[in-house]
Image (cartoon, rainbow, N blue to C red):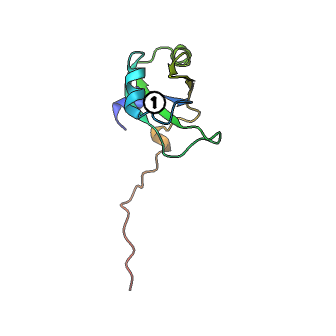
Amino acid sequence: MDHACAIARSIFVTNFPDSTSSKDLWKLYQSYRTVVDVYIPNRRSKARKRFAFVRFIKVDNVDRLVGNLCTLWIGRMHLHANVVRFECTHSQVHRPSQPVRKATHT
């Protein structure tokens, strides 16, 4: 696991326009903390809205960060932010102890 992953905090963001790109979110959030990753999945939420995961480093107070991010607007849309429910930790990543071998057909 890289060092950035160990110290990063991921924030779930939703309610932004369809035209918004990951680069747009990166620029918007960069002024609040150091952004290391922005990911917008192709699928939509159950509420049929686009959503993204923004990963920050150097976060002292995550509640204050989320509060600040919830004050932002893109056009006429008020952004919603929240701490992700499940952080993927190094121990959750499955790594086989033995090399994976391809099956041979006879």
Q: Which quadrant of the figure contains the C terminus?
A: bottom left
Question: At 50% from the left edge and 22% from the top edge, which residue is drawn?
Answer: 75
Residue 65, position in %: x, y?
50, 16
Q: Is residue 32 visible?
A: yes
Q: Secondary structure at mark 1?
A: strand
Camera-side residue of 20 and 29: 20
Give the residue type that dot 1 points to.
Answer: Val
Please say whether residue 8 is visible from this viewpoint: no
Q: Nearer the viewer, residue 5 or 23?
A: 23
Which residue is at the front of the view, 99 or 26? 26
**Residue where numbered disc 1 is placed:** 54
Residue name at image x 64 percent, y 42 percent: 46
Q: Position of residue 23 (x, y in %)?
A: 37, 31
Q: How many marks?
A: 1
Q: Residue at image x 46%, y 50%?
A: 94
Local crowd size for mark 1, using a 10 Å CA cut-off: few (<14), some (14–19), many (≥20): many
Q: Is residue 36 above or below residue 64?
A: below
Residue drawn at x 61%, y 41% as measured from the top left = 48
Return the residue found at the far bottom: 106
Which quadrant would residue 57 be assigned to in this image? top left
| The N terminus: image quadrant | top left
Q: Could you tell me residue 73's position as x and y percent?
A: 52, 20
- The vertical placement of 60 against 14, above or below, is above
> Does residue 40 lie above or below 13 as drawn?
below
Residue 84: give x, y in percent of width and height.
55, 31
Q: Is residue 100 above or below residue 31?
A: below
Which residue, as the protein is rendered here, is positioned at the far right?
A: 47
Res 3 quadrant in image: top left
